[in-house]
Image (cartoon, grey):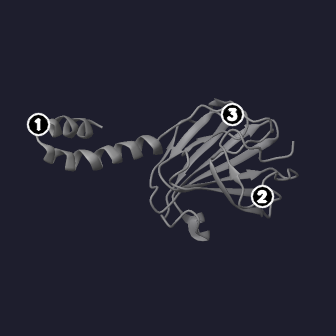
Amino acid sequence: MAATAATALLSRRDRRWALAATPLAALTGGMLWFFRDPERTPGPARILSPADGVVQSIDPWPDGRTRVAIFMSPLDVHVNRAPLAGTVTSVEHVAGGFVPAFNKDSDKNERVVWHFATEIGDVELVQIAGAVARRIIPYLTVGAKVARAERIGLIRLGSRVDVYLPEGIEPAVSVGQRTVAGVTGLDHG
């Protein structure tokens, strides 16, 4: 932003500075758009989407849980939200690779694994870095109380968030459906 302002001021004296000011202004606008963090009114469902994006897959897990994977493109809001109220019981950073987040091998990518103690039991959420997204920033620590749709962290650029619905909870979303963090319901409850 400072470079944009400086080159814009300098372009008043010499038009050649406009050659630098124009792309810097576009870059500044893009960064402001990318790091936007709109206010949200929580949706009515019991379990809410933690991410803006598209449901990439819904997979039954051997332990009875169901994984809902949400892919976030670089155009989506990348602030992630708590799927329901509870207490953070674990926040674990796991080192890994950086393949594209829509690739099935992205399960081995750099990630942060969250566990929440909630009214329906343990809920696991995984923030997964992508090929470009190489930084996950958790906002909370173990022991923090969290409200439904409260901001929990940020993944920079394209990435994925997986939510593991506890056994017996049927997903209310389908593959290809767009979700809005803190608004779209993931369950029928």
Q: Name which quarter of the figure residue 183 lies in.
A: top right
Q: What x and y, as percent, mark residue 11?
A: 17, 40
Residue at numbered disc 2: 174
Q: What is the secondary structure assignment of the residue under circle 2?
A: loop
Relative to 172, is 38 on the left or the right? left
Which numbered marker is on residue 87?
3
Crowding at mark 3 (Cα within 10 Å: few <14, some 14-19, many 20+):
some
Crowding at mark 2 (Cα within 10 Å: few <14, some 14-19, many 20+):
some
Q: What is the secondary structure assignment of the residue under circle 1?
A: helix
Q: Find out whether the residues at labels 1 and 3 contact each other: C-beta distance under 8 Å.
A: no
Q: Earlier in the sequence, mark 1 or mark 2?
A: 1
Relative to 100, is 24 on the left or the right? left
- Residue at horizontal 86%, vertical 53%? 170
Q: Earlier in the sequence, mark 2 or mark 3?
A: 3
Which numbered marker is on residue 13?
1
Q: Which of marks 1 and 2 is in front?
A: 1
Distance between mark 1 and mark 3 Cα atoms: 57 Å
Residue type of the residue flagged with mark 1: Arg
Q: What x and y, as percent, mark residue 131?
A: 47, 63
Q: Find out whether the residues at labels 1 and 2 contact each other: C-beta distance under 8 Å.
A: no
